[in-house]
Amino acid sequence: MIKELFERRSIRRYKKDMIPKEVLERIVRAGTYAPTGRNLQAPIIIAITNPEVRDRLSKLNASIMGTDGDPFYGAPVVLVVLADKAVPTYVYDGSLVMGNLMLATHNEGVGSCWIHRAKEEFELPEGKEILKDLGIEGDYEGIGHCIIGYPDGEIPVARPRKDNYVFWIE
C-alpha cells in the first residue's frame, strides 16, 4: 500500500481504449469503502463510460474553465463524486472517496487525475438535468471528477517533497 501511495501520479494524456467493466467495478467499489463521517456515506459516484455523456460533461466543464479544450484529457471514463450537503462532513467524505478511487485506479494499472469544477457543473441547469435524468434526488454538491484511462506516454516522475512538510512534536 505504501508503495502505491508513493508511485501514484496524475495522468494528463490517455489512450482511447476502454477500461474493462470488471476493472471499473473494482475501482468504483473501492471508492465506496472510503471512510465517511459517522459512516453516513454522504457521497455518491456517477460512473460515466457513455461517450456522449462524457463529452457533454467535458464541454460543460470546459465552458466553466473558459476553454474549448477537453479538460478530461481524452480519458474514456469519468467518475463523478458528489456528496449530500445535509451531512456536515460531506466535502471531506467526498474527498476521501476521490482518494480511494485514484489509489485503486493506480493499483489496477490505470491512470487517473482529479479534475475540478464539479461543484460549479452541478449547480448549473445542465448539471441538474443530468442528475434528474439519472433519477438522483437530493441536495448534492459536486466534489470532483476522477478521470481514468490507460496512460498515453511516460508516467510523470514525483517532484521532491517540500522542506518543512512535517513538523514533529516529540
Image (cartoon, helix red, strand yellow):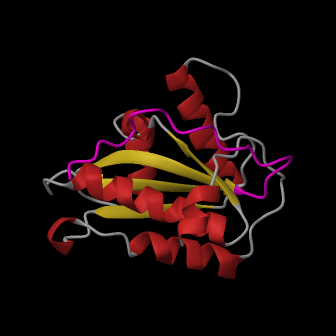
* Number of numbered discs: 0
Image quadrant where residue 87 sits: bottom left
| Foreground residue among 111 and 163 | 163
Q: Residue at x 43, y 36 (%)?
A: 121
- Give coordinates of residue 132: x percent, y percent: 38, 54
Asked if residue 47 can be seen in this view, the reply is: no
User: In the image as oriented, which residue stretches furthest toward the bottom?
Assistant: 22
- Give coordinates of residue 91: x percent, y percent: 27, 49
- Give coordinates of residue 136: x percent, y percent: 34, 61
Magenta span: predominant SS is loop
Task: Assign the N terminus to one quadrant of the image.
Answer: bottom right
Query: Does 80 appear above or below 55?
Result: below
| Foreground residue among 52 and 153 | 153
User: In the image as oriented, which residue stretches furthest toward the top?
Assistant: 66
- Give coordinates of residue 168: x percent, y percent: 27, 47
- 118 magenta-colored: no
| Foreground residue among 13 and 55 | 13
Q: Residue at x 43, y 42 (%)?
A: 127
Image quadrant where residue 111 sits: bottom right
Q: Which residues are magenta?
A: 149-170
In this rendering, position of residue 63 left or right of residue 54: left
Q: Residue at x 71, y 53 (%)?
A: 51
Image quadrant where residue 44 sits: bottom left
Asked if residue 63 can be seen in this view, the reply is: yes
Q: Residue at x 86, y 46 (%)?
A: 153
